[in-house]
Amino acid sequence: MSLTEIFSSRTVCVSLAPDLLTAVVRSGKRIVAHSEVRIPLDQAEGKWDGALAAFGAYLRTAGVTLKGVPVSVALTTRWCQLAMIPWSDALLHQDSAQRFQQAQFVGIYGDAARAWSIVCDDAPYGQPRLACAIERDFLQGLQDVARECGHPCVAIESVLSITWRAIASSHPQAFALVEPGRLVLAAAANGRIHAVQAQALRGPWESELPQAWQRWTLRAPELGEIAQVALVSLDERPALHALPDYFETVKLPPAPAPGYAAVAMMRC
């Protein structure tokens, strides 16, 4: 491989959450040695402005050595609201699709959703679609900072999507994603997520996870037939007690250090 090919294959991978920014530089599937960056954040209220500032500070500090290298950003589900959008013929046209998607989010989350930018996956005709919504100002801020620092921004997405790509080859029927303070449950079939449930955590995740799964299966009895739930934990606090046997911890790509599990999954 030539030096040009090595340079062109590089990607800056950044994970943003209320308490932490982590970043690595990848060269293809390999994490470049000594490229790890960890910036603790003090955002007790979970606002994204501190993360945006840290994102800019990191890219400016990276300087000329990374200028022009594409950036991919993973966002906590705290800042990426999730919903399954029911099928409608309105989804067949871009303008009507945007109006329909926003109406769905407004119905779930209230008028705040009118200030969100929404994207959907490309489900087959007639099937519901997984949608993700990000505050428009936050999304624009990330794109502006990357551009001002000389980086094409190739992706800004929920850590849920990144996790699904990392584990999809094992064909799980369902999986649980644990983040610090957050829990997401998802069911999958035919290579797609077809149901999702997200919630805040108010206690130890290993205590709340079985209860959350049980409540979800009571509301959606068809999920009760799922025998195994893959478990991906980005919360590195050790579990205080064992989980039920139907939760099976997924072996993630090796991270260069504690706290880097999200960026380790970002194989662009």
Image (spheres, rainbow, N blue to C red):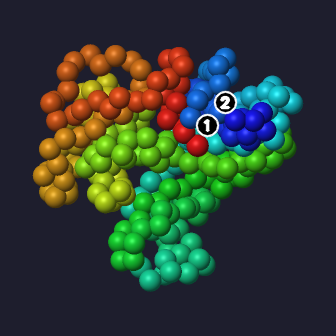
Residue with the most extreme front position: 1
What residue does disc 1 label?
28
Which SS class for mark 1?
A: loop
Determine the CA span between mark 1 and mark 2: 9 Å
Q: Using residue 246 as the reference point, say whether residue 29 is left or right of it.
A: right
Q: Using residue 6 as the reference point, say whether residue 214 is left or right of it.
A: left
Q: Which part of the image, by quadrant, shows the C terminus? A: top right
Q: Label 2 sits on what residue type?
A: Val
Crowd tier of the residue under label 2, counting other residues whose Cα lies within 10 Å: few below 14, some 14–19, many 20 or above = many
Crowd tier of the residue under label 1, counting other residues whose Cα lies within 10 Å: few below 14, some 14–19, many 20 or above = some
Instruction: State whether residue 251 is above or below residue 141.
Output: above
Instruction: State whether residue 80 is above or below residue 26.
Output: below
What residue does disc 2 label?
25
The location of residue 113, given as percent across then percent down, is 54, 60
The location of residue 134, given as percent across then percent down, is 58, 53
The location of residue 18, given as percent across then percent down, is 57, 32
The location of residue 13, given as percent across then percent down, is 63, 35
Q: Is residue 130 visible?
A: yes
Which SS class for mark 2?
A: strand
> Which picture quadrant has residue 33?
top right
Residue beneath the point at 37% across and 68% down = 128
Residue beneath the point at 76% across and 48% down = 152
Q: Label 1 sits on what residue type?
A: Gly
